[in-house]
Image: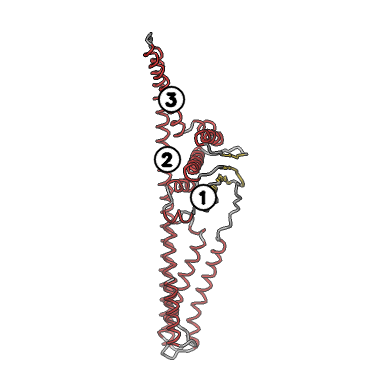
Amino acid sequence: MDPAEKEYFNAVLIVVIVVGIILLYFVITAIRYQRRSLRLHKEKIQAEIDTLENERKRIASDLHDELGPLLSAVKLQINNLETTETNDMQLIEKSSRHIDVIIKKLREISNDLMPNTLLRKGLKKAIEEFISNSQEDYKLPVKFICEQELQLDQNREINLYRIVQEVVHNTVKHAKASMLIIKISIQDNRLFLMTADNGVGFDYFLKIRDNMGLGLRNLQSRTEVMGGEFTCISEPGKGVAYTIEIPV
Amino acid sequence: MTIIVFFFLLWLSTLFIRGYAKSNLSFYIVYSFVLIFFSISSFNRMVVNDRKNIFTNARFWICLGIIIFYTYFIVVNTARLSVLRSKVSRHFIDSLFEINIYSNLLVNLLYVMAVIWIPRKKNISTLF
């Protein structure tokens, strides 16, 4: 190379180095911001879920511990009323029946908000109870398979329970299915929650492109908070299958 | 589709103007720019939307590779384009190409990372 060419080549090399430095800086900052955004996103979802669950717990315990005994006391007082008139006796009996219905509904609402079984007996029993109640209410046959004992922390248990609740509600509301299968298994320190129905299904990619919907987003957020992976396989006419895989 | 048709026409027109025996440097530069813009846009989308560790995303490594390789490709081809009319030695041209060799090596290493992080097919058995 003659001196002019050498000078030109050195200029090109300087450009190459400068571009390299700019590219490196661009990539490093982008990755740092992505990590920060990811952390903030997880913290935000966790805070939202915690607030929601605490509020549910508070309302459930208020309903169960305060309104429940109060209504029982009212029922007792009504039943203690002494009357000889048939009309009054019928009225007392009717009011007593109404109070029974209110107490029953209150227990159901309180249990839906925060099931006692989940807190006392764990996830497996809580899901079994929820499924048994759902089958009575919605007339949807649900098969629950869980052969292992589940030892999870309470937050995970609550999140998994809410996921199952959401899946059952979605199936009842949208799927027009005649069968729902829910399976929980643990393999190689990973918990798999798999669900499948034989309903109408939907185009998953179309759904996430248009508007994901609150239910699906909820499933995804709860899975993300547990550090897991959420997979949905569905096609129109071929049912819906969800797989949630979380580390344990 | 519009972009593909536009580039095909651009490629054809430059081919007729310059003839196909010569390197079509201006076209190389234009398509490199477009590839870089697409990659940056995809890269930014990943940074904003990806909820997993970005290093485990194969697309991240591919976009990074395209950005790095084609940036240097533009630098080298712009340098070649600007010295095209003056008489330069063979050694000078070879030295310019050496930059591409190193960027190519780096990019292939990035593509290896992409291959490592190709999402594994999930073994999901249907419950029905």
The percent coordinates of residue B46 (x first, y second) are: 44, 60
Q: Nearer the viewer, residue A13 or A33?
A: A33
Who is closer to the viewer here, A166 or A13? A166
Q: Position of residue B122 (x, y in %)?
A: 58, 54
Q: Secondary structure at mark 3?
A: helix
The quadrant of the rendering that contains the C terminus of chain A is: top right
Instruction: Using the rendered image, report if marks 2 and 1 lie on a common chain.
Output: yes
Mark 2 neighbour class, 10 Å CA radius: few under 14, some 14 to 19, many 20 or more: few
Residue at the spot of label 3? A101
C-alpha separation, residue under disc 1 versus residue under disc 3: 37 Å
Q: Nearer the viewer, mark 2 or mark 1?
A: 1
Label of residue A201 in the image:
1
Q: How many marks?
A: 3
Mark 1 or mark 3: which comes first in sequence? 3
Write down the residue under mark 2: A50
Cα separation, mark 3 vs mark 2, equals 32 Å
Residues indicated by labels 3 and 2 sit on the same polypeptide chain: yes
